[in-house]
Image (tube, grey):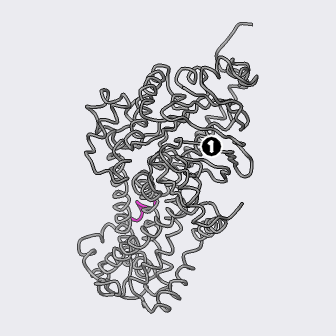
Amino acid sequence: MIPTLKTTGGLARRRRNAKLFAYFCMVLTWMCIVLLAVLLVHTTRDGIGWLDLQFLTEFPSRFPERAGIKSALWGTVWLIGMTAAFAIPIGTGAAIYLEEFGGRNRINHVLDIVIANLAGVPSIVYGILGLAIFVRGLGLGRSVLAGALTMTLLILPIIIIAAREALKAVPMSIRHAAFALGATPWQTVRFHVLPSALPGILTGTILALSRAIGETAPLIMIGALTYVAFTPQGPMDQFTSLPIQIFNWIARPQQEFHQLAAAGILVLLAVLLLMNATAVWIRHRALRIK
Amino acid sequence: MTIVSNEEMAATVDHTASFEAPPLEARDVIIAYNGKPAVNGVSLTVPENKITAIIGPSGCGKSTLLRSFNRMNDFVAGAEVTGKVLYRGLDLYDSSVDPVEVRRRIGMVFQKPNPFPKSIFKNVSWGPVINGFKGDVSELVESSLRKAALWDEVKDRLNESALSLSGGQQQRLCIARALALQPEVILMDEPASALDPVSTSRIEDLLFQLREKYTIVIVTHNMQQASRVSDFTVFLENGRMVEFGETDQVFTRPAHKRTEDYVSGRFG
């Protein structure tokens, strides 16, 4: 027999299988992207004609040609801004406690499980909770504050889980190095662990806020599905939001409103992309400084 | 366990605490992980301004013993120390002792170089700064880097990331970082095991210079290194101390058969 280094027999079959699997994965990846692209093209075709400055600066109206999303856009900005102001410090703080200070006792183990389960609770349930606690219980009414607090509850588990993963990824040797230099646990976290984990925490936070920006059900639950002809001036004002406005328009029979909804979706997507871009930029900066 | 009142406790501590007392002393130390002893009844006195090497086969408890000297075992879940570890006659595991204070006086260099992902300057200055150092930080950074024989290599790039240094340089940076706190004792956990021979010999040269001013305890599984750099040698096996004596004696005229077998390379 002469020696050969070419693929033969069993190896050829294994190679073929490996290749098939790679193609299979590629097809799956493209399937998601193509579906999204089709959706985007479809929406753009419907909505682009309505998308102009007037659309952004007018309040909703029963005449499609005069209707805009000013109140919804500002409502969303207020809602997400306040949600971020509540959820980021609380979520990061909780993650730091659980990961860096809590230790491995039974109570923290139970907390772990509870938080993981809370991340999977349907958003409408948080809506009911928000209605009972914030709108009625604390008497905040249908205010932006009540909405932001409800959204905070909704995304806290997501932020906590993401922030904990980011903290876990910081090598133990960094903590030991700091402790061996006579640092207190807080100094170790403040100067070394948190800066190292920040990019990961930011990514998780933005993902969570992206989820909040698209949420509709809990807001309908707490009474944000009303006609609002003004922008919020303070945290106690009534509000509406982009997804609610979209839902509102879709629910009407006239073709024009469906196209307005499509235009609203485009604005929502733009806001979302802007947020993600900001996160990427901040992460990039954080990495460069390090 | 006996319960003593605060006054009694303070009295016993004050009675023995003094800078004349040895820098480190272990009395019947047992260190257990989740009930399983890794160090089992070790008693020894670490001599001042000398290099003491702890040798022994893998898993004999060398690193565990070393880490009990500055309470780094606190971070290992399930670790429990019984017996007494004394610094200048003070019980390191007394409830009134602040482990942060302990680690300011007893520094540590780890097996793998672990510089902070920050500038070279900040790596050295951070420890003193957070501990309230009020003097000239640049001067302290320079003198620490000089003591660690790293100054000439990094003096023009102090603001570059410490991660841009080679492994050997990173380890000397970690030594400089420990020196900047002006500790009395430096613990080293196999500081050269992750380094190439040239870097290793530089670290060993450095140890000789540091011996003048510091008490050094070094864990190593490299017997040649122990015989080259140390004044005293502790031989551990299965968590028990087999032999403790001057390095010359331990390596040439060991008192125990197990020590002789180990240092002559018959096992381990």
Image position, residue B50 (x, y; %): 50, 31
Image position, residue A214 (x, y; %): 45, 70
Asked if the magenta segment contains residue A165, the reply would be no
From this view, report whether residue B54 is shown above or below residue A231: above
Q: Secondary structure at mark 1?
A: strand
Image position, residue B186 (x, y; %): 48, 38
Asked if the magenta segment contains residue A42, the reply would be yes
| Dominant secondary structure (helix, strand or loop) of the stretch shown in magenta | helix
In the rendered image, which residue does mark 1 sit on? B26
Based on the displayed image, in which of its 4 quarters is residue A244 positioned?
bottom left
- Does residue A15 show up? no
In the image, which residues are magenta? A38-43
From this view, report whether residue A65 is shown above or below residue B6: below
Residue found 49% across the figure and 35% down from its top:
B215
Query: Label 1: few (<14), some or many (≥20) within 10 Å?
Result: many
Say what amino acid the circle numbered 1 marks. Answer: Ala
